Image (cartoon, rainbow, N blue to C red):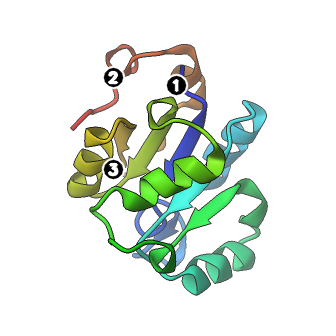
Amino acid sequence: MLHAVIVDFFGVIFNPATGQPMPGLVEFLQQLRNQHWPCAIASSSTRHTIEQFLADHQLVDYFSSIVSLEDVHNAKPDPECFLLAAEQLQIMPLQCVVIDDTPASIQAAHQVGFVTFLFTGQFPDVTALDKSASVPEINLPVY
């Protein structure tokens, strides 16, 4: 059963084309909150960049944990940041969905036991994630 979400910052939360939050982000985060799913950020961006953006867009309260470049020895695509985020959420990788926009990071997260979702501009339906215990039933791409 899935219980938490770990998301990348650049390309999933932050839209590099506009400098704004990705379309649908706030609604997705609200769905997570309504389902009582904690959400963490795992990113190779700096903590200052992440925290400033979250503060500027009133998104801070949606995240239980932030793992940034400064918190790990190995930057993505190494899965260290995802593993640390899961540890901070006090949840096992197989109970988390990692959402990232790079295939290499998705593959690395999957190899250490996370359910993965390659972000291509549309967020997954949290209700579908919550009702399914296996990736194929909800048609998430797995790498």
Mark 1 Cα-neighbour bin, 10 Å: few <14, some 14–19, many ≥20: many
User: What's under tag 3, amino acid-wise?
Assistant: Thr
Please indicate whether residue 93 sits to the left or right of residue 142 in the image: right
Could you tell me which residue is drawn at 77 percent across and 34 percent down?
Answer: 34
Mark 2 Cα-neighbour bin, 10 Å: few <14, some 14–19, many ≥20: few
Q: Quadrant of residue 67?
A: bottom right
Residue that label 1 marks: 129
Could you tell me which residue is drawn at 60 percent across and 23 percent down?
Answer: 127
First of labels 3, 2 by sequence position? 3
Q: Is residue 23 shown to the viewer in this render? A: no
* Mark number displayed over residue 120: 3
- Work out whether residue 44 or residue 30 is closer to the camera in this orientation and state it: 44
Please indicate whether residue 1 sits to the left or right of residue 105 in the image: right
User: What's under tag 2, amino acid-wise?
Assistant: Asn
* Residue 101 on image: x %, y %: 33, 56
* Residue 105 on image: x %, y %: 28, 55
Q: Is residue 46 shown to the viewer in this render? A: yes
